[in-house]
Amino acid sequence: MARLEITDPSGGETLGEVELTDPAEVEGIVSRAVGAKLAWRETPVAERAAMLDRAADSLEARQAELGTLLAAESGKPLGQAEFEVGGGIHFLRGNAIEGRRLAGRVLPTEGNPGTEWDLAYTRREPLGVVAAILPFNFPVELFVEKCAAALVGGNTVVVKPPPEDPLVVGAFREALIEAGVPGDALGVVQGEAGVGAALAASPGIDAISLTGSTAAGVAVATATAERLPVLHLELGGNNACLVLEDADLDLVAAEVLRGRVLMNGQACSASKRVIVHRSLHDDLASRLQQVATEQRVGPATDPETTIGPLIHDRAASRVAAQVANAVGQGATIAAGNGEAEGAFFAPTLLADVPTTADVARDDEIFGPVFNLIPVDSDEEALAVANASSFGLMASVFSSDLQRALVIAERLEAGGVVINGTDNYRPPIIPFSGVKMSGRGREGLGYTLDEMTREKPIVFRNLRARKD
């Protein structure tokens, strides 16, 4: 059986290995999940929730160890990796709580002529077998986001971890199995795109929850169109951050930095397009030059590192090519050198980016690159922001909140933050995109709703008066 060696993207140190799944074996794993479906959905939700709590308890004792391992395998700076592991544990407990209060509704049949004597209610039921396909940038958070919600809702799951950093995801899966989740109810496949394609194509899959590129989402939608499984897709983003001429630039610089360098700039919801009023462009560029040069690039497990390696050398080379393309289209490198060093890519500031450049519309740079796009009016800023095919999150900076609100309501995005980074995803909000950024919501309770369906049950004339 072939095995995949997992290495540190910065130095090549071997961290562990996983057993690769042959695409021909995927159908058998899905069949076992189908076979486990009935028994799992009939397990009382209180028991399913208790398993999530037990898994969280066991993982909490290993939080520091798993945080270090996640930093090493993903390149994510240590503090961020520790936060993600802690967040995953929190999500397990949060989904246990949400599962325990999963409820339907009593429907208002009394007020409708012809149904006055009926009793109708709804209940939430599982979708069936869910394929959960995970990205490399937030593997633990999204494993729990998808799988814990699906499991507590009564679904069985087959998860495909990212081949770049599957080790901590594996630890979370094992914790759930040790806590009582049957192995066939939480199956796993390991491998590259061919394995994911086989998983998505399996006729036993009732729903697919994928976080990844828009191209991957389109491929899944196209390949499954004849079967019409439920699709839950969080895809690419080229977020617009609109800086109006009355904005507080100290706040803008701090928030843009925070929103752009998370996971070394490899976040779908990062602030990738800073659309700034021309009168503020040079001042903001100067501030971003300073914060960019203050970043410490180094090994992810070094506590002083703020930007670690990208997920592999190829990712860094792609970012360098995108920067070169932007420069060829009229942008200026105002900080950094725009060059990759192995998997490392130092923070780079592109100033005076023309509104016609690829990065001003749909060229999503997955790395620590700040793009400053000068415009002359609010209307032009809106036009540039909405010209993108993506619509994940957006932000508006202005001291005039009414003005900011008018713009926020006109932005074509899944959500808008005023006077803060658009890289904003606390578990209490519904996180979702529009246009080519996806379908469906994620967040505590919201994912659970997406992983279940509301089914009405009606008793005809149950309440009718007796003669």
Image (cartoon, rainbow, N blue to C red):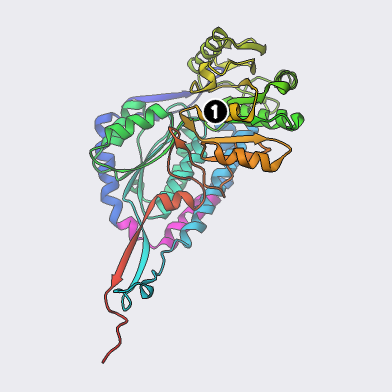
Q: Is residue 91 left or right of residue 119?
A: right
Magenta region: 39-58
Q: Is residue 198 left or right of residue 153?
A: left
User: Horizontal and vertical percent for residue 392?
Assistant: 51, 35
Residue 421 in sight from this viewpoint: no
Q: Nearer the viewer, residue 149 or 1?
A: 149
Residue at point 73% right, 18% down?
A: 282
Q: Is residue 239 left or right of residue 45?
A: right
User: Horizontal and vertical percent for residue 418?
Assistant: 65, 40
Is residue 172 in the magenta section?
A: no
Report which quarter residue 251 is drawn in: top right
User: Horizontal and vertical percent for residue 173?
Assistant: 44, 43
**Residue furthest top in the image:** 328
Residue 235 in sight from this viewpoint: yes
Residue at point 66% right, 19% down?
A: 297
Say few, some or many: other residues with alpha carbon within 10 Å of mark 1 (under 14 / 14 to 19 / 20 or more). Answer: some
> Please, what is the three-letter code of the amino acid marked with disc 1?
Ala
Q: Main secondary structure of the magenta part?
A: helix
* Tag 1 residue: 383
Give SS at disc 1: helix
Q: Quadrant of the N terminus?
A: top left
Is residue 49 in the magenta section?
A: yes
Q: Vertical placement of 1 versus 412: above or below?
A: above
Report which quarter residue 250 is drawn in: top right
Q: Nearer the viewer, residue 23 or 228?
A: 228
Q: In this figure, what is the number of numbered marks?
A: 1
User: Horizontal and vertical percent for residue 6?
Assistant: 46, 25
Residue at point 27% right, 45% down?
A: 32
Q: Is residue 27 left or right of residue 63?
A: left
Q: Vertical placement of 382 versus 464: above or below?
A: above
Q: Quadrant of the C terminus?
A: bottom left
**Residue furthest bottom in the image:** 467
